[in-house]
Image: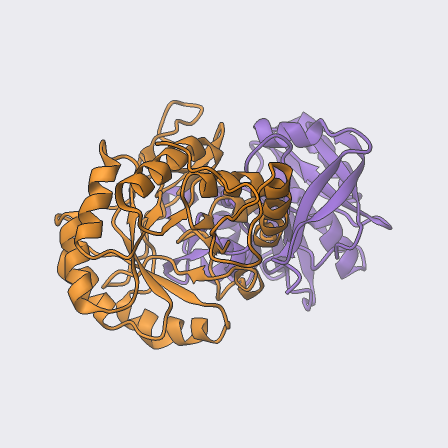
Amino acid sequence: MRILNASGCLDALAAPEVARRLDAFVTKTVTPMPREGNAPPRMAETAHGMLNAIGLANPGRERFLADHLPRLGELGVPLWVSVGGFCAEDYAETCSRLAGIEAIELNLSCPNVDEAADSAAEIVAACRRATELPLYAKLSAAHPDIPEVARAVAAAGADGLSLINTLRAVALDRNLRPALARGSGGLSGPALKPVALHAVSACHDATGLPIVGMGGIQTGRDALEFVACGAREVALGTVLFSDPGAPTRVRVELAAAAAEVGVVMPDGGNGLVKSPETVRKVPA
Amino acid sequence: MRSSGSPSRLRFVGSERVGPYTLLRLERGDVEPGVPGQFFMLEAPGRLLPRPFSLCLAPAGELAFLVDPIGPGTEALCRLRPGDEISVLGPLGHGYRLDVERPLLVGGGIGIAPLPYLAEQLGGSPPVVLGFRSAEHAEAAVLLPGSEVVVDPVLVSDLIEPDLDVLACGPEPMLHAVAALCPTAQLAWEAPMACGYGACYACVVEIDGALQRLCLEGPVLDAARVRAHAEAVA
């Protein structure tokens, strides 16, 4: 079972020792042009989660390709590049220029910018024509019929799914004003886990595609639940903020949690849970 | 790099009331106290995210932090009981440069937190000017014996000698006022942050004309690097 980070929740150049604890590092989303991101405050804690409205701050495609990507390559960790944009051509152009990485994750669901006008399937199809690298579509669970979106991106050529992104939400300060300068933000953390488990299970049923499951994973037991719902890999997000040692800890806890319920995780395997008691896929 | 390795579990030793604040003492364990002005992320029991604190004092075998109980996280820290353990990550960020010839320490409110450790590390009993919003808050000046204390409406900026090497920490309007008086001052800033090691991108401040992460660039910055916003100075 491989453990990744959720895009945007770790800067591998600022904290390489944390990135090296992962089985693959997923970059912050790269957009065609540089983005400074939203004005602060950009973050607020909520009862069982947190909101962020970073706004896809990133150096832009050209500087990422010329400067950041080569430095990331020196980490010795398999790389996934998260690609964003505002139309299908934006995404496809970036995809066409990526090489030497393990996979591309298409961010089709950032809640903190105005969304691309093109549909998820149109974007995936354009990227499919632009690259032969594995394409993972990162979807939002806010869509009323996420298995339908999953089927559409699968038909358009996606190789896998990343589930889920944050959910758009609002928190108020003491004076009943939005806590974030942007007003709304993306909700992450433990509050998200039940939503994410459903999305993973439903999309697994709908497509059978490999899934990177994420949303509120704090412990190895949480990760095991994603496996039980059909995830092949898991990603850690908000938990990295409070515990940069989480990748190592969750890996240890996952083995113990699996043993406790009588399932065996293969050693460093690809997330396939094997007998004696295979995790039964939870119905969506 | 030690700073963003893994958090250490440190045992709570005790706490003391200092005016409206609480001085929280933890066993040091394997955690280095770092440079004055650097900060630590302290687990806030029962909360999702840790909270940033600069080191206030470094008694033998301990680390001490000054906490202002203003919300659920800081209140939980003030309720720790002997024997409790919390996760601590740090030291993080960049602290004060100590190679100054004529230091003047300037603090406002809870911003006095890093100054006792700073005074100790500088040595030679540097002059200290502290400002508070009330007489009760001013009781915290006991942490810096010999300091000159003013209470609102008198401001610390009224007492600063601009030709000294000012090292300051306090609320934003105070820092902007100090920056206007002393362009060479070293100022410790604060911003909401989730991680403290560059992962969350929440703590951005306009530094050198662009939004940059305070946890990596600061929290102590040369005054010239942060532009004063007109309304903050007014």
Q: Is residue A56 visible?
A: yes
In terms of depth relative to the viewer, which is nearer, B1 or A122? A122
The image quarter containing residue B145 is top right
Q: In this view, does B53 lie to the left or right of B48?
A: right
Residue at x 55% of width, y 32% of height: B153
* x and y percentages locating residue A97 in the rendered image: 24, 73
Q: Colour of chain A?
A: orange
Judging from the image, what is the letter of the chain drawn in purple?
B
Q: Can residue B52 be seen in this view?
A: no
Which quarter of the rendering shows the C terminus of chain A? top left
In the rendered image, the vertical position of residue B120 relative to residue B56, given as above or below: below
* x and y percentages locating residue A148 in the rendered image: 20, 39
Q: In this view, does A119 lie to the left or right of B45?
A: left
The image quarter containing residue A78 is bottom left
* x and y percentages locating residue B74 in the rendered image: 62, 32
Which residue extends farthest front?
Answer: A276
In terms of depth relative to the viewer, which is nearer, B69 or A112? A112
In terms of depth relative to the viewer, which is nearer, A125 or A17? A125
* x and y percentages locating residue A59 in the rendered image: 33, 64
Residue at x 38% of width, y 72% of height: A69
In the rendered image, the vertical position of residue A205 relative to residue A245, given as above or below: above
